[in-house]
């Protein structure tokens, strides 16, 4: 009985582990992460400057800095902090042409595909997001603070420029890739 349980566990691990650790279409996954970050940019509320003037000097004047929220570390943290957790709402779904695309699931109960497989895909993209941010976080943070990351351009910055998992469609890029082969 115990031997059968171990064999069943081994088969389960072998069938689920590839979903968790490998994403076939890294460009598509990165684009989904970029879309979620873009959604965060679109829905962020305007904020006042951060007042870091908490101390008084000997003349009773406030000391410290007044930091623009748009260039603050706090804004970067609020945009990126729970991004990968939000990616657990995504899964791979087949479209009409038979290709698979990353889509956001609003109601897991209404999902028509295999729920266990869909959950495995959601964990895979969440893990991919963690690795992606780990590799690009410093540069991405600086670009956000500089104001270079804007709605409509997140995918290009994150997926082409920083992580290089997607390749642009320009002729120069294609020539560069041909030279690498």
Image: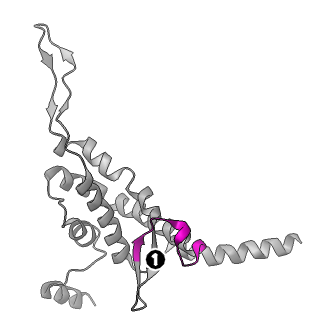
- Quadrant of the image occupied by residue 138: bottom left
Quarter of the rendering containing residue 119: bottom right
Quadrant housing residue 97? bottom left
Magenta region includes residue 108: yes
Closest to the observer: 24 or 86? 86
Q: Residue at x 31, y 46 (%)?
A: 77
Estimate the x, y position of residue 128 in percent, counting from the top left: 43, 66
| Residue at the disc numbered 1 | 92
Residue sitting at x 49%, y 65%: 107
Q: Residue at x 25, y 69 (%)?
A: 155
Which residue lies at the image location 28% right of the left edge and 60% below the top edge? 39
Instruction: Determine if the magenta segment contains residue 149.
Output: no
Q: Is residue 116 above or below residue 70?
A: below
Residue 11 percent across, percent down from the top left: 70, 78
Classify residue 50 as left or right of residue 116: left
| Observer-nearest of 60 and 88 | 88
Q: Quadrant of the C terminus?
A: bottom left
Residue 33 x/y as whole percent: 34, 65
Position of 90 compared to 162: left or right? Answer: right
Magenta region, residue range: 102-116
The correct choice, above or below, for 32 with respect to 66 in the image is below
Taking the view exactly as shown, the residue that stands out farthest to the right is 1
Outermost residue to the front: 110
């Amino acid at each position: 009985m115990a031997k059968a349980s171990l064999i069943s566990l081994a088969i389960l691990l072998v069938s689920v582990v590839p979903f968790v650790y490998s994403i076939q279409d890294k460009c598509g996954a990165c684009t989904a992460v970029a879309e979620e970050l873009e959604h965060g940019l679109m829905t962020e509320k305007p904020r006042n400057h951060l007042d870091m003037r908490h101390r008084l000097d000997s003349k009773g004047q406030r000391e410290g800095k007044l930091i623009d929220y748009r260039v603050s570390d706090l804004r970067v943290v609020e945009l990126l902090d729970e991004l990968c957790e939000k990616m657990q709402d995504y899964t791979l779904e087949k479209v009409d042409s038979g290709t698979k695309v990353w889509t956001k699931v609003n109601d897991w109960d209404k999902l028509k595909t295999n729920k266990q497989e869909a959950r495995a895909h959601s964990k895979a993209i969440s893990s991919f997001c963690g690795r992606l941010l780990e590799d690009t976080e410093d540069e991405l943070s600086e670009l956000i603070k500089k104001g270079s990351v804007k709605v409509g351009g997140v995918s290009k910055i994150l997926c082409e420029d920083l992580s290089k998992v997607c390749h642009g469609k320009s002729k120069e890029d294609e020539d560069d890739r041909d030279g690498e082969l």
